[in-house]
Image (tube, helix red, strand yellow):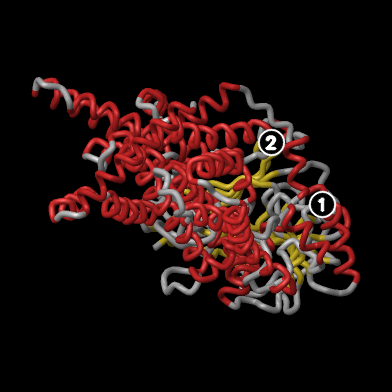
Amino acid sequence: MNTGITSEKREDSRAAEQERTLSGSGVGSLRHALVSPYPMAGLLFVAGLLFYLATLAPSVVTLFDDSLEFQLVTYQLGIAHPTGYPLYTILGKLFTFLPVGNVAYRVNLMSAVFGAATLAGVYLLIVHTGASSQLSRPGWTTQLGGIFGALLLATGSVFWLQATVAEVYTLNAFLVALLLLLVVRPLTPPGDHRRFYGVAFLFGLSLTHHRTTLLLLPTLALYFYLTRKQHGLTWKTLASGLVLGLIPLLLYLYLPWRGHMGSLDGAYQNTWAGFWRQVGAGGYGTFVVDNPFGHQRDAAFYWNLMQSQFYTLVPGFVGIFYLFWVGQRRILALIGVTFLTYFTFNLFYRVTDIEVFFIPVFLVWAVWSGIGVSFLLQITAGMRRALWRFGLTGLILVVFVFILFQNIHSARPLLDQRNTWQIHDYGLDILQQPLDEQAVMVGILGEMTLVRYFQQTLNLRPDLQTLAADAEADRLATVEKLLGQGQPVYLTRQLPGAPERWSLSAVGPLIRVNPTPLTELPANSIELDQPVTPEITLVGYRVSRAPHTGAGPAPVRLTLFWQTKTPLSIDLKVSARLLDPTGEVITANDAVPVHFAYPTTAWRPGEIVADGYDLPLPVDAPPGRYIPLLIWYNPAQNAAEVGRVELGPVTVN
């Protein structure tokens, strides 16, 4: 190991001398302009940003992960979940001022920007490593390898997805890439400690964002050891570096400064005890010492995960071999320690979304892959016979394009499925309903966060109170308390125990909790008296269109008013369908009445039950008249039909 380090020291000295000689002449300046890696890094940033913008989530796109939380927390400058993420929150607030799209889109845009910046960092990591091994500025083979490594990371499904929604992982990857770029570059001359100070400050800044930055400590410890050994770092210099590393941690004072806003789940307490509990994130340690969700992952899982991001791992193994072969053991050790610490931690971290914690691992493998491709191109470019030289070089480039195509082909369906307007339209739909004044909505945290997002960013129904209760027992107790106080209550989802206590009715996508059954048909309804089963009569209905953004027609919403004169002993279901002029079913929605919340066995004789069904139309559905068909059936008897009724035609424009 000492021999390798000494050899690299001599190589660094020779490279520095060559650099000084070249830069002192006009030819050197011209060469610097032509082969400098930074213009290409800038082009990769622009290309990566355009690539991610093409697939960027248009608004809020999920209810059940941290993306929605960050879209609201950054806007209101609130407190995110542990560790608080002050750096991300402040940067996100700056992005919310951009005059493009909606607030959620702007925060999504931040992920795209740092995702593209990470690609530039990966490219620079590869070309600087290649330059160190060649004792010269990077040639075309090294630059092509850098482009390949960056694009390989860019098109991997996990990183690509995180670059299109409001999440913390692209900013974290960017900071990891910057730190690695600082530590793998040739050592600075003795007495020049600027790089050391930069590493210390950037590490401290990274700690204000994501706590997995601590996994870089072994890499930084090795870097400091090599730097001190070869360049005589004094204890005074180390102390100065420590101070520089601690200064960015002052960003955590953001938490007590904005503590009056609280966290969305109400868990943050603006006390010193609450501050340290938030920053320390001790509750997440259970995913290391325990396995609360019972995840069992074998070696095949991790192999397939790596393989799925790169299509093939061969270039990465070639890159590792190349660094070892040419004696770049310092660089190999520094990057390799990073790979091993992150990979080992992930083996023991039992969270559901473990894939995102592998992004630093993917980053390192992308660097090794780019170096491997650069090495293969150097071999083919050095062949004497033109046929072999051009043929094999072209083959490598064709394989490179094929791999990228396969990555894009496999990841694109995931993006198309996730990055839609569905959640955005759901939130608007809730707040556009004719809800009672000073009503209270009760649901799980993600749903309440969605409503609060639209309340604050669009000032929709600020009078509507939202209460989050994830546990069903807590929701039931909350509803009972609110009704006892005489407040109107709406639910976002079915609630076991509610049908036995109260009457329920559909209001758009919501469920109204009625202390007493409804007995009159609401105004603006089409009146009917159409028996559908021996017990159930359709007494009226409404046809409307649900909020819809994006391509295709808006869903048809059927609000149906059922009435029964006698109790029902069977839980029946409804199949609501739309038929085209030829009688073919073009869309259907099967459900237990009132959004699965109010089974027929709970209906009170004489009450009118408001029931709702949204029928989404295909994107290519032609304009025209469609026939709504309602079928009641018994799911316990092989979906045996017990009654049906057709409604008047619906015109779809």
> Residue at (89%, 73%) from the top-left corner?
485
Q: Residue at x 42, y 74 (%)?
A: 99
Please give the residue where the numbered disc 1 appears in the rendered image: 472
Disc 1 secondary structure class: helix
**Displayed quadrant of residue 290:** top right
For disc 2, the neighbor class at 10 Å (few under 14, some 14 to 19, many from 20) is: many
Q: Give the residue number, with chain letter if any, for mark 2.
A: 350
- Report whether 282 appears left or right of 39: right
Q: Is residue 490 visible?
A: yes
Label disc, if present, on residue 503 of the rendered structure: none
Tell me residue 583's x, y (percent).
44, 45
Q: Nearer the viewer, residue 623 or 39?
A: 39
The residue lying at 31 percent from left, 45 percent from top is: 16
Q: Which sits in the foreground, 238 or 280?
A: 238
Residue 425: x and y in percent read 53, 62
Residue 240 lies left or right of residue 270; in this view the side is left
Q: Tell me if 409 is positioned left or right of 43 in this view.
A: right
Q: Earlier in the sequence, mark 2 or mark 1?
A: 2
In terms of secondary structure, where does tag 2 sit?
A: loop
Q: Can you tell which of label 2 and label 1 is closer to the viewer? A: 2
